[in-house]
Image: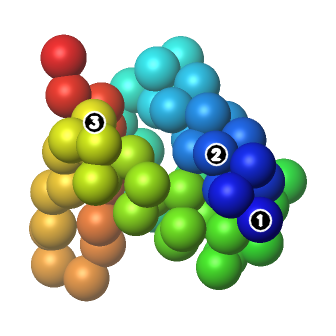
Amino acid sequence: MENSIGTAAGNVWKYLSENGATQLSTLKKELDLNGAMIDRAIGWLAREGKLIEEKKGRSISLSLKE
């Protein structure tokens, strides 16, 4: 399972790299991954210190740290 989480994290990173700050709901719609796998991928990237999470009301926006 670790490889698939790593691959998913790579897909999330690539999407954010190409598209900039993105709402979590949009990310879940755009990537061909189930919600649980996206959550795991985000956790992986957060643990690595690669994400910025910004809450605006009920929505969450994610972007990459520079």
Label 3 sits on residue: 50
Residue at 20% of width from left, 28% of height from top?
65
* Residue 56 relative to residue 43: left or right: left
Q: Which residue is mark 1?
A: 1
Q: CA distance from mark 1 to mark 3?
A: 21 Å
Residue at image mark 2: 6
Q: Could you tell me which secondary element the residue under label 2 belongs to?
A: helix
Extreme residue in the front direction: 2
The amino acid type of the residue labelled 3 equals Lys
> Between 47 and 58, which is closer to the camera in this rendering?
47
Q: Quadrant of the N terminus?
A: bottom right
CA gap, disc 2 to disc 3? 14 Å
Q: Residue furthest right?
A: 32
> Which quadrant of the view contains residue 64?
top left
Mark 1–mark 2 Cα distance, whole angstroms, equals 9 Å
Query: Mark 1 near mark 3, Cβ–Cβ under 8 Å?
Result: no
